[in-house]
Image (tube, helix red, strand yellow):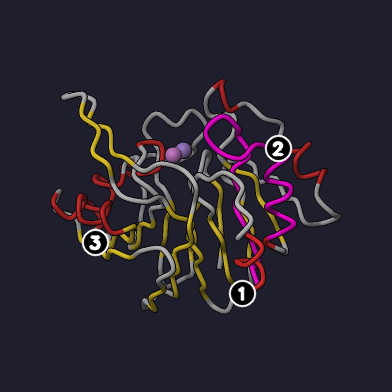
Amino acid sequence: MKVTYHGHSVVTVDTGNHQLIFDPFITGNSLTDLKPEEVKADVILLTHGHSDHVGDTVEIAKRNNSLVVAPNELAVYLGWKGLNVHPMHIGGSHQFDFGKVKLTQAFHGSAYTEEDSQKIVYTGMPAGILLTVEGRTIFHAGDTGLFSDMKLIGELNHIDLAFLPIGDNFTMGPEDAKLAAEWLRAKQVVPVHYSTFPVIEQDPHAFADSLPGGVGKVLEVGESIEFK
Ligand code: NI
Ligand code: MN
């Protein structure tokens, strides 16, 4: 299994049999190496409804006939746009053919912004996503502030790899993300959601260096971690 970072909160997982993508924000993402029209995904996993996470979901899902797994209200909304969706909600898990997904809480907002009509459509609660594939558990925290139940998530799950936001302003900054890393007890922690916009500019290496030896890992855009 190959897990690759594509800037902001975009992460792909290639299992050999399945191609998954988390939060495919590509158009407007100043950091990404992806082109929306080239993305192959049979599964799209969404943490919440903000445009820097839903991103190019509609286009990618229609072209690939992808299954979109998302918190219920967001899934319903995208279902009305003609996508093949699987709604879930916080605390719930489901065994799919590609692996197991469980949604965790995230302290943030969730809304789809329709720029043309200046309308905000609220899409329920935001979430984090625990994905277990081939015996490995990946935690994509979504956008969130620090919360102490990360200790519980760390106790209940053996997290091999966690993607944690460090950008500050909208999410945890590096200091809170350092505590999150400790509480989640993840074997490896990769910082995300930074430096895409000026207001979330951060030094990911300073964050990675602040974690105990070997835990922090900065992935450059397009760089992968492979699990054998
Ligand atoms: Ni957000
Ligand atoms: Mn965001």
Report the residue at 55% width, 68% height from top: 1
The image position of residue 35, as x and y in percent, is 38, 39
Separation of disc 1 and disc 2 at Cα? 27 Å
Q: How would you rate the neighbour count of disc 3 (Cα within 10 Å): few for under 14, some for 14-19, many for 20 or more?
A: many
Separation of disc 3 and disc 2 at Cα? 34 Å
Which circle marks residue 204 in the picture? Answer: 2
- Mark 1 or mark 2: which is in front? 1
SS at mark 1 in the image? helix
SS at mark 2 in the image? helix
Separation of disc 3 and disc 1 at Cα? 27 Å
Q: Is residue 109 above or below residue 183?
A: above
Between 222 and 27, which is closer to the camera in this rendering?
A: 27
Q: State yes or no: discs 3 and 2 in contact (Cβ < 8 Å).
A: no
Q: State yes or no: discs 3 and 1 in contact (Cβ < 8 Å).
A: no
Q: Is residue 37 left or right of residue 16?
A: left
Label 1 sits on residue: 156
Label 3 sits on residue: 85
Q: Is residue 33 above or below residue 215?
A: above
Q: How would you rate the neighbour count of disc 2 (Cα within 10 Å): few for under 14, some for 14-19, many for 20 or more?
A: many
The image position of residue 34, as x and y in percent, is 44, 41
